[in-house]
Amino acid sequence: MSPKDWSQEARTLGRRARTAARQLAAAGAGAKNAALRAMAENLRAGAKTIRKENAADLAAANQAGLAAAMIDRLTLTDERIEKMARSMDEIADLQDPVGEILEGYVRPNGLRIERVRVPLGVVFIIYESRPNVTSDVAALCLKSGNASILRGGKEALRSNLAIHRLLAEAVASQGLPADAVLMIETSDRDLLAALLRQDENIDVVVPRGGESLIRAVAEGSTIPVIKHYKGVCHVYVDDLADLDMAEAICFNAKVQRPGVCNAMETMLVHKHVAARFLPRICRRLSQAGVALRGCDETRRIWPDAKPATDEDWYAEYLDLVLAVRVVEHVQDAIDHIARYGSAHTDAIVSEDVRRIRRFVQGVDSSSVMINTTTRFSDGGEYGLGAEVGISTDKLHARGPMGCRDLTTYKWIVTGEGQLRT
């Protein structure tokens, strides 16, 4: 198609979503929850079809030579499909944010002023690799009364289309518009560019993926963008840490699932415990297949580590690779994170309350973890049911974005004939 054809296609998709959004905004909690439960059951019933399409995506990914971590992100097992369905049930169980009165008061002239939570409208989500995002974001948008336009990565196209068909059928079966959940069925970038100019029909864009994708979306969009930049997550092991706890936390943060944005990418260790802590954790990480890249002091203690470059401190590996640095004190760790971090998730392991307080106050990230793994930085783990993304912005949302973060508010003013003089 020519660019002109894509512009028309984008306009049509935007208008379809806008029409559906108006219907959803008026839908009650019962109707939305019924649709969510139907979506969950459709996923369970259609698991075989999803796995078949996912197998085709995986075959193409392996042939293309995608990294093991990317293959893991792409893979859908029965267990992961069931987790997707359970997430929808959990979202249905959440309190409906729409209509919540955020504040209300009466002015001296008798006017009642209320600030009430309402849907954003139409949410355009752009994401890569993980097909479970299709169900998560569709469910969160529906719960919060928003229509969604979904654009997944080409490597997961068949999986995403299979999931979307099941979701749209479930929504329609409960009397809500099937267009409440729209899926872009092409990976053509010209259509993406045209959609990013549909500011009259789309209210917000949420890109999830590599830094280059997010920057391209932010630069090409006339629609407000909530950015989910890379997850350069740190764990700082203080000299007053329980080293057994620190070892378990660091291992979990790196190895449990290295291809996700809340995995640890840099480990910072206080110089006073480095000689005791680094040999034990580096040995365990190496045995798990982690390639280590360290500063000079790290390599003096663990010579098998490769020299770390300045680029390593900025790196989001999304793989079994870890940068390691020995720091002078807690402020040195804070300064390192301020320079090289991405404002995603950073953790401290320490038994000292003052050090913890200093770290929490000094680290300006969307989530700061105390004596626990960065892997808990997740909408489901925060009790949000799932997440649309983890925003590293400060406006309009920050951290894992759940239902409430997909709403805005409007003022409702009630009078009895008062006139301004």
Image: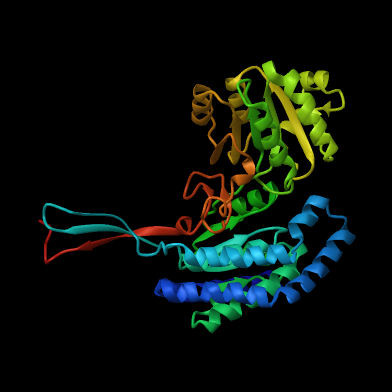
From the viewer's perspective, is 50 left or right of 239? Answer: right
Tell me which corner region of the image, top left, top right, bottom left or bottom right, holds residue 156: bottom right
Tell me which corner region of the image, top left, top right, bottom left or bottom right, holds residue 58: bottom right
Tell me which corner region of the image, top left, top right, bottom left or bottom right, holds residue 7: bottom right
From the viewer's perspective, is 360 left or right of 251? Answer: left
From the viewer's perspective, is 91 left or right of 310? Answer: left
Q: Report the front residue among 12 and 118.
A: 118
Task: Measuring from the top left, give residue 256's x and y in whole percent.
Answer: 72, 46
Report whether residue 384 is seen: yes
Task: Measuring from the top left, give residue 140's x and y in whole percent.
Answer: 53, 63
* Quarter of the figure with the C terminus: bottom left
* Vertical arrangement, residue 248 with respect to residue 358, above or below: below
Residue lying furthest right: 63
* Vertical arrangement, residue 61 with respect to residue 213, above or below: below
Q: Report the front residue among 33 and 152.
A: 33
Task: Measuring from the top left, give residue 266's x and y in whole percent.
Answer: 70, 33
User: Residue visible at 63% across and 41% down?
Assistant: 374
Task: Measuring from the top left, give residue 188's x and y in whole percent.
Answer: 72, 66
User: Residue visible at 72% across and 37% down?
Assistant: 251
From the viewer's perspective, is 7 left or right of 258? Answer: left
* Vertical arrangement, residue 296 with respect to residue 342, above or below: above
